Amino acid sequence: MDKKYAITRRSFLRNSAITVASIGLSGSIYEFLFSGLAPVTAAKISDVKKFLNACPRNCYDTCSIVSTVADGILTKVEGSTLSSYTRGKLCAKGYSYTRSIYSPDRIKYPMKQKVRGSGNWERISWDEAYTEIAQKILQIKKEYGSTLPICLNKYSGNFDIMHYGIEGMLTSIGNTTRATGTPCWPAGIDAQTFDFGTTYCNDPEDIVNAKYLIIWGANPAWCSVHSMYFVKEAQKRGCKLIVIDPILTQTASQADLYIQIKPSTDGALALGMARYILDNELYDGEWLAKNSKGAEEFFSYLQKNITVEWAAQKTGIPRGVIESMAREYATTKPANIWIGYGMQRHTNGGQNVRAIDALAAITGNIGKSGGGAQYAQLQTWGFAYYAMMQKKPENSGGKSDRLININNFGAEVLNANEPPIKMMWIACRNPISQDPETAVVNKAFEAMDLVVTADMYMNSTVEMSDIVLPVTTTFETPGVNVSYWHYWLSLNEQAITPMYECKNDVTIAMELSAKLNELEQGSCTFPVSGDLEEWVGKEFNDAIYKQFGIQDWTELKKGPIKAKTGLIAWQDGKFKTPSGKYELWSDEAKKFGHFPLPVYTEELQPNDEFPLRCISAHWKLGINSQFQNLDWMAAINNEPCLEMHPIVANKFGIKDKEPVKMYNDIGYIVLPAKITETVSPDIVVVYEAWYKGKKINVNYTVKAIPADMGKKATGSPGMAFHDNFVAIKKV
Amino acid sequence: MLQNHKYKMLKEMETRYYIYSLFKIYYQGDWQAIDKALQAVNDHQDDNGQSAEPLINGLLKKISKINLVMDENSIYEYNKLFVGPGKLLASPFESSYRNQLGLVMQDETVAVRNFYKKIGVEVKGKNGVPDDHLALELEFICYLLAQAAKQIDKEQSASPNEYLLLYKLFFVQHIKPWVYEHCNDVLLHGVNPFCHGMAEIFKEFLEGEEGQNAM
Amino acid sequence: MKKAFVVKSDRCVGCHACEMACKNEYQLEATIRWRKVYQLPENEFGVPSRHFASLACNHCENPACLAACPAKAYTKREDGIVIHHTERCIGCKMCMMACPYKVPVFNEKIKKVEKCHMCADKQDRGEKPACVAGCPMEALEIVDLDDTNLANMRSFLPGFPDIAITKPTTRFITPNLGIQVRGNNNG
């Protein structure tokens, strides 16, 4: 036995900085030394505690949660009964939270892939991770004269306010490239911005006061189930529910009247209704005179260009139905419209929203309880954004941040030059799964020198990263959350110790800053230390305190609190438009290249080669790429499917559950068919989600077609996800 | 005579302790330490010659050979099996094998925590790492064996050793129910000779322990 | 007393929160579902629609499971709840074959059967079952059949096995159908 066998021949074993005390085998059985265990210190009483948490996902409902923690282990989650919106209930995804925190597959340590995409990962220490990242940042700065080659893609994986510290981290290193805009809702936001001055909805709990409610291109049964309760309650109190949707969804199945509309023609329906309202003098002239600008021009447009006949032909809805709906909407008071985000994911989405807003305006349904044109609100988001507001270091190069379109990410990363993009930081986002034109996004990743992703789980974006950093879940760190729909403010307490080596993104920012300054003093202005709970406190300001009627944020430790004011949008009639009125005629819109009135712009049509429209709607058991990959969800349904009408199935000779290839000129997917009459014959439906272990992603077929609006309020136009034209064939 | 018997017992225990320690370090994941631990087992064998136990001898020989097949790919595969960032092919957590959800920090973890507590130990950085990680369970076994050795050393008669009894109990309650399945998962999913070999040796060792101690 | 689930298919939107609330409460294994949400046949009510029923155990008046069990592992309480006793279960699966609703599920890990027990322990504490409390639409309720006006409730839904066999206590409120207007291109 060669005793002198040397360690040196194992050159691949680095001097590991992993702080596992490797002294356990320092000697014989008589020299036992603790490493992972330790003698019990004090006699601690193992107790059961309750904590307040909030679901930080990109969801209307942003539930207030109560967590039960026994001896430091999260055992149960429940909805908080202290919020009259959450009402003590979570959704299927919320109840599965313990599944995601305690899965053995969570990313536990910083890890590195020497060869991107190889699947061969080695563990590194946080210090090694920070060193490599910091060195790269400084090397880029030296080579290109600025930090512009570093690009941040961050969005809605976690909407906790303090997570804007990620943007702050990038600001604190200098001028950088930012993926700007939002995939979800910008066309509608712009539309409401042109009409009202900003997007602002009533408190959804007010829905119970409506006597006529149109849910237009939204599916709250799946995407905002707590609101569905209020919708039902309204129905109980005599409200008539109309649902307009190309798909007969779970929400539509609850409607008193379901209208199956030709996709992307919603503006035509609204304008047809408006014409009828005009002809029959059912409009609120008084309200218009007092509160609006451009009513005359709008009515003139209707008279010259719109007829109910035309609207019927465009939308596929019988004339009589349009007329009776118009009459009912105009004469029932109060009448409410919920405009869905799905509805505006078309090339004419923005204009369509403007037309629907106009309906609310001409019937005087704005600024009233039970009325309105609900889309979203950012009223409760007026925080200090302390973590986000960092200063750029001196002499960091470049003039300002470079903005690229988040909805055309792959192409714009590849096209960037002077300087090119060489490094990416990805957080709260999964672009390889969620972006259109997946092949292009992959190419963009391949062109990078360094890709850093902060995430909780392996996903397709992590697969293509060089370094992955493990982050904390909502339960392991403090935070604060609000919703873009309801008016509650929820504190998120730290309920359990962060597991393994997971860190909050703000902690990562602080420690990266320390490393950068160690290597080059002054290269990063982000604070290098701080208590996370204190950081949360600093997000609050007087405006929030006033709005919520509290003196100090610690009052939120007793429970979530509802805004005291501003619960009915535009009640004071003070619109935030340039004229201060509701603008049917908007010069702002003109500035951005749109027609100033809510006119109809033609929808995209399929062609002979790709005759079917594919709508990739949201899925009930997941939010974008989160949740569906969990085992509990997979047990309910682990199979994506292509929903199609029997007429379509017959035409292509497809039987239920048989595999079908859905394709167009940029990509294809193969999945089983589901034959159902609940979708209209001119569309097929795939629900967007990420199924673990399955190579199906509807985005392979989705082109980065922009929606008409979005640039004004969000910096980039939106995405026309539902203008995806495909063909299908039996496999 | 008793001295001789005691001496023999302690010598055997020490060898088994070294093997347990090796696997403890293996599951802790510090590769420099794993390397050193392998060397230490070999050194120990060199110093002590043949063991009275043919089974143990066989294992020691295999351990010395496994030394030679450790390579870079061993680290990648080790991470795929036990660490991440993807789905673990052979989770090193007891509760993930035993509870119905495959989660950690469930009832089984609490049971292990309580076992540790009764003996007066707990996990450092409580709740940061599940108490039932195999590395911690193996450390616990090493602790029990160390205490057992101390006791044997002091004892005048060959009285029943409390710590050995606890070791047997822990093995039956917290090792036997899942570690074999875990090793089988490694053998099923692992292709790297090092990881594969370690799983084989570990399984054989545990089976030997079970047999020897009538567990 | 006859405790029973009322399943309000006029309120249920098929969100699966009830299933998950049950799993969250009892930390069930992934493949074991004590409560399941079923989509009702699309054309059952005359026009295509998406309607659902959420079903767990029907706590039958003449439970087939109880009758079939050779180990006396089932009892029916005074209040009607049918309880399975794990400690007496021998894993023979006779109850699984006997139950017309396929309610008992087999737990591979412990090699015994298990099923919904209407959260009897929670109810005894004055709390609602996890599914009832967890449903955002309030589409599940517990009633006492002996003491409730059952006028608008049905004992069966399309696809339900013949109720005469075991007399399930679960009651249903059928969905309301609205008027549907489909485009001209759909006949």
Image (cartoon, rainbow, N blue to C red):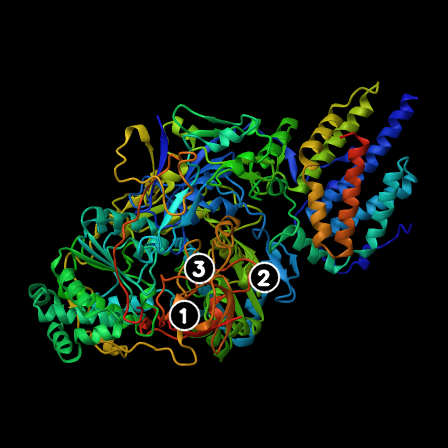
State the residue position of label 1: A648
Q: Position of residue B53 (x, y in %)?
A: 88, 36
Q: Quadrant of residue B73?
A: bottom right
Label 3 and label 1: CA atoms lie apart by 27 Å
Of A73 and C29, the residue lying toward us: C29
Q: Position of residue A462 (x, y in %)?
A: 56, 61
Of C3 and A93, the residue lying toward us: C3
Q: Position of residue A542 (x, y in %)?
A: 28, 50
Instruction: Determine whether label 1 and label 2 are within 8 Å by CB.
Output: no
- The amino acid pointed to by label 1 is Val
Classify the position of the C terminus of chain C by image quarter: bottom left
Parent chain of label 3: A
Compared to residue C10, the image places residue A277 above or below, namely below
Of A49 and C37, the residue lying toward us: C37
Q: Is residue A492 visible?
A: no
- From the viewer's perspective, is B104 left or right of C142? right
- The amino acid pointed to by label 3 is Asn
Residue occupying the point 13% across, 70% down: A276
Q: Residues within 10 Å of mark 2 (few under 14, many from 20)?
A: many
Q: Residues within 10 Å of mark 3 (few under 14, many from 20)?
A: many
Residue occupying the point 34% across, 67% down: A680
Parent chain of label 2: A
Mark with earlier residue (3, 1): 3
Classify the position of the N terminus of chain C by image quarter: top left
State the residue position of label 3: A624
- From the viewer's perspective, is A597 left or right of C121? left
- From the viewer's perspective, is A374 left or right of A69? left
Compared to residue A623, the image places residue B128 above or below, namely above
As helix, strand or loop, the secondary structure at mark 2 comes to strand
- The amino acid pointed to by label 2 is Ile
State the residue position of label 2: A467
Q: Quadrant of residue B130?
A: top right
